[in-house]
Amino acid sequence: MRSQRIRSTTTDCLRALGQSIVILALAGPAFSQFQAKPREKAGSPSDKIGMMFRRFIPTEPYDWRGAQTHALTTVIWYPAEPSAREQAVEIPGFNFFELGTAARNAKMPPAPARFPLIVISHGTGGSGLSMAWLGEALAKQGYIAAAVNHPGNNATEPYTVEGFSLRWERARDLSEVITGALADSEFGSRIDPNRIAAAGFSLGGYTMIEIACEVSDAQGFVHSCDTNPIDGISASPAEFPTLIEDFRKLIREHPEALRRSGGSYRDSRIRSVFAVAPALGLAFPASALRKISIPVEIVAGESDQNIPIASSAKYFAAEIPGAQLHIFPGNVGHYVFLDSCTEAGRKNAPVLCVDGKGIDRNLVHRETAQMASEFFRSTLK
């Protein structure tokens, strides 16, 4: 299938089939360019966290969605031994976001013998590092957190139409990361295979529902856009004006692209999912959501102007049995769930970095991460 390269320079929210173009300020550099700058960090030695990068290679054939990189590049945060030296994570040339602190390639502590694993899915156009605030917080609470770069849909290389629109393939990426992590020489023996869960933001939140559900309905979503548009989510955004047309052309010329869209991506190894500002409620018929049998928790902001909570977060919560829903009140919008920004980010990328009046992004992060940690603790017993 011939790839059509799509480039954008501004927004996280793709309002149609992708809903969110995230962290474009991080686009470009490879993970090998990671550098760390020593920085003192308060806290007891027991809360040290480590960071490693992995390239998991699934068994071929694999749908790489036209991506240049045929590997699932993944950043992993994990509890580190007390003597580990944490450093500020920095990417040369990109200083819009605070990526937290971690001890690169540190050893894990000898106890406990095994840790729960949380796989993390970023928003459209983002990267695993865009979820550093959550990965690091979970690692401090005793989890191994692995955030993957979704092929054709991440900020480290050019975007593709397939990467943006064949969104159901993202669930398979997470399943392959689980398989790779369990076989990894460093982490495999330290992961408890009976305590695996997932978390995701924006289109990554959609991915949570996909991996918990038996079926989605891509063609039904397209039909809904044609016959009953809701809240403007079916319109291509100004930053990506040809997306709807590109997608329709793709499925017209390559109908096989939709072949697996209605299949089940349920991974029985995943015991629960935590969806942050999830997208694309219309992609799931209510009858399918009602069959979800694992615990689901959903978090969103009341003032999310990018992904309407009525047709996504609230819709999911209303239809999924036992789903928990927390809506942050007031001026909490969509981008508050990105990494916190530096002064350079607030100056040069205000759409991504400047939150509503009175909103403390770090506080929202802490509260969200605490909810996630407590949710996983209760569902991964």
Image (cartoon, grey):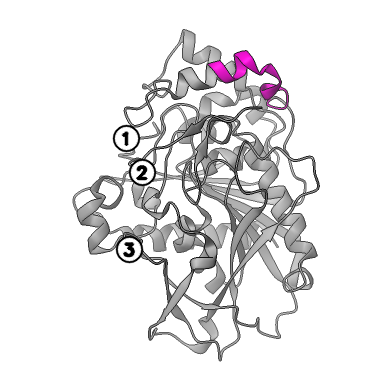
Q: Position of residue 54 (x, y in %)?
A: 65, 64
Q: Nearer the viewer, mark 2 or mark 3?
A: 3
Mark 2 lies on residue: 334
Front residue of 129/262: it is: 129
State the SS at label 2: loop
Horizontal side of residue 40 vs 174, given as left or right? left
**Is 39 on the left-hand or right-hand side of 211?**
left
Q: Neighbour class for label 1 at 10 Å: few (<14), some, many (≥20)?
A: some
x then y, percent, for residue 55: 67, 59
Crowd band around label 3 with a 10 angstrom C-alpha radius: few (<14), some (14–19), many (20+): some
The location of residue 240, given as percent across then percent down, is 38, 29
Look at the numbered disc 1 and give the secondary structure of its residue: loop
View extreme (top): residue: 227
Determine if the magenta segment contains residue 258. Answer: yes
Q: Earlier in the sequence, mark 2 or mark 3?
A: 3
Quarter of the image with the N terminus in it: top right
Q: Residue at x 38, y 86 (%)?
A: 40
**Which residues fall within the magenta stretch?**
249-261
Could you tell whether 319 is left or right of 301 in the image? right
Q: Does the magenta-highlighted stretch encompass residue 24?
A: no
